[in-house]
Image: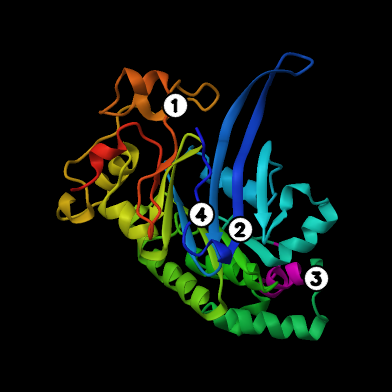
Amino acid sequence: MSSVAPSSPGTDNVLLSVRNLKKHFPISRGVIRRQVGSIYAVDGISFDIRKGETLGLVGESGCGKSTAGRAILQLLEPTDGEVLWEGEDLTKLSQKDMRLKRRHMQMVFQDPYASLNPRMTVGDLIEEPMIVQGIGDKESRRARVFELLEKVGMNPKFIKRFPHEFSGGQRQRICIARALSTNPTFIVGDEPISALDVSIQAQVVNLLDDLKRDLGLTYLFIAHDLSMVRYISDRVAVMYLGRIVELSDSNSIYEQPLHPYTRALISAIPEPSVDDHGAEEEIYLEGELPNPASPPSGCHFHTRCPYATDLCKTKEPEYVDMGTDDNSHMVACHYAEDFLKT
């Protein structure tokens, strides 16, 4: 399956290009730890992220979303593929050069309780990335810490407090301030709201949206909550078992999903009427996500797809553009045309 999306409007404004990215984890057994297989966590994904946009990456737990985000930032070494940052392949950089690049790209992790060192004060936590990157002196860094706390809606007087003194939502705001400390261009949000109370999630998403507008940020927003992804994302990529099965602008994905897996995810969104978000019938997924160490043949989704045929079991679908000249709509399904609305 070719997983490289064709050029689309605005490709001259691309900040990040991911090409056939793979991350396979070896399975070893025995005393000498001989490799007997691999877990295909990310198995050949490709997409572009344009400057100033938010790309949502969605899918079930275990589909490889978080691994993809870490591999893009080189926090995990990719098995294969390219990650082009303004044309420069990050996978070819030395550790020293990559460390310098990281001031331009940061990550907000899922768990605000685990991602903050409990022995460091808020001020030290936010200042630490600037120290690592050699940014400014002590006085200018402290001024930056005060500025960032205000920007994320926190009282600068909290600078000497410790993480355990804050709620989950406040901790995530601190994490966002820390990510902004090096003045990055690109931020990967690895399910940044999933560990928060529902009442707080919207506040954090609104904060991220405001920061994007005010600071000109670009986001890769990883999540499994499709309703929230629709709110914040310009385009949405749907991931299943290490591969992207559908990618288009947010409206097209929700109003006219062309892959059965996408339709199933949308059917699961609580809505007064299923027709409101583009699926004519509710689709319920049966069974669990297959083992990524031994993915199914043909279309990986055929074991759970209500529309699967013998073709789906034996032949891998091409990743093709079913959109228009003005709007790319990539999908990997043998029967995607059947879901096109006339």
Dot 4 falls on a residue whose secondary structure is: loop
Stretch of the chain drawn in magenta: 119-130
Residue at 51 percent across and 73 percent down: it is 212
Give the residue pinned by disc 3: 131
**Marks 1 and 3, how far apart at CA:** 49 Å
Q: Residue furthest top?
A: 30
**In the rendering, which numbered label is found on residue 7?**
4
Mark 4 or 1, which is nearer the eye?
4
Residue 127, label in figure = none
- Residue 258 position within the rendered picture, expressed as x and y whole percent measured from the top left: 31, 43
Q: Is residue 115 magenta?
A: no
Q: Is residue 319 above or below residue 292?
A: below
Cα gap from disc 3 to disc 2, whole angstroms? 26 Å
Label 1–label 3 contact, CB within 8 A: no
Q: What residue is shown at x 54% (from left), y 61% (from top)?
A: 11
Coloured how? rainbow
- Type of amino acid at the residue the image marks with label 1: Glu
Q: Which residue is mark 1?
A: 316
**Of pointers 3 and 4, the one earlier in the residue sequence:** 4
Measure the C-alpha gap from mark 3 to mark 4. 39 Å
Instruction: Look at the image and tell me whether residue 110 can be seen.
Output: no
C-beta proximity under 8 Å, tags 3 and 2: no
Packing grade of label 2 (10 A; few <14, some 14-19, many >=20) is many
Query: What residue is shown with label 2?
Result: 16
Judged by depth in the image, the label closer to the viewer, 3 or 4, is 4
